[in-house]
Amino acid sequence: MNASICGSLLQIKLFGGGINLAPLPANLDPQVVEKTLYRMFTPEWLRDTVVSHRVLNLMRQLFPEKSERFTPLRWAELFYTSAPDLLKLVLAFEGIELDTFTMLMFYAGEGIDPNVNRECLLSPWVKPVTITS
């Protein structure tokens, strides 16, 4: 993750819309920011947040007269419900056929946490389900 992405993540108005999470100091170390973000949030959440905000910014550029009306909560709900459709469009654009095998490979690739031993903030309250046969 480079310094501009780290800075973008800190400047994104993640919660509530009008407040930046933190002012960016001039001597910001991208590696420290990256480690902190990965301790606080899963990489998937960070990726989805960046994609969501890039699409939101695109919509605001396409409709500048209605830019103020794209509120964070409404956008989050819309993006959450339409993300699967966006994935289908991206796959189709890349020429990848969405069949059962592709979905299973997608779930295998994205569903397995590469940082399974990483402590998450919700770990004390959220436990994985144990499947028994």
Image (cartoon, rainbow, N blue to C red):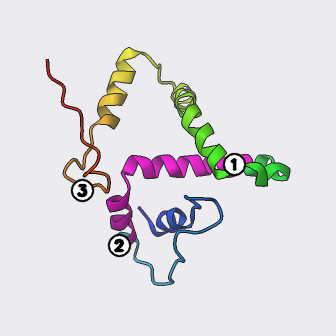
For the residue labelled by badge 2, is the local secondary structure a helix, a strand or a loop?
Answer: helix
Q: Are marks 1 and 2 in contact (CB under 8 Å)?
A: no
Q: Residue at x 34, y 36 (%)?
A: 110
For the residue labelled by badge 1, is the local secondary structure a helix, a strand or a loop?
Answer: helix
Q: Is residue 45 magenta?
A: yes
Q: Which residues are magenta?
A: 33-59
Labels 3 and 1: the sequence-earlier one: 1
Tag of residue 114: none
The furthest residue to the front: 125
Q: Is residue 51 magenta?
A: yes
Residue nearer the viewer, 124 or 94 = 124
Tag of residue 119: 3
> Which residue is under mark 1?
58
Labels 3 and 2: the sequence-earlier one: 2
Amino acid of disc 3: Glu
> Which residue is under mark 2?
32
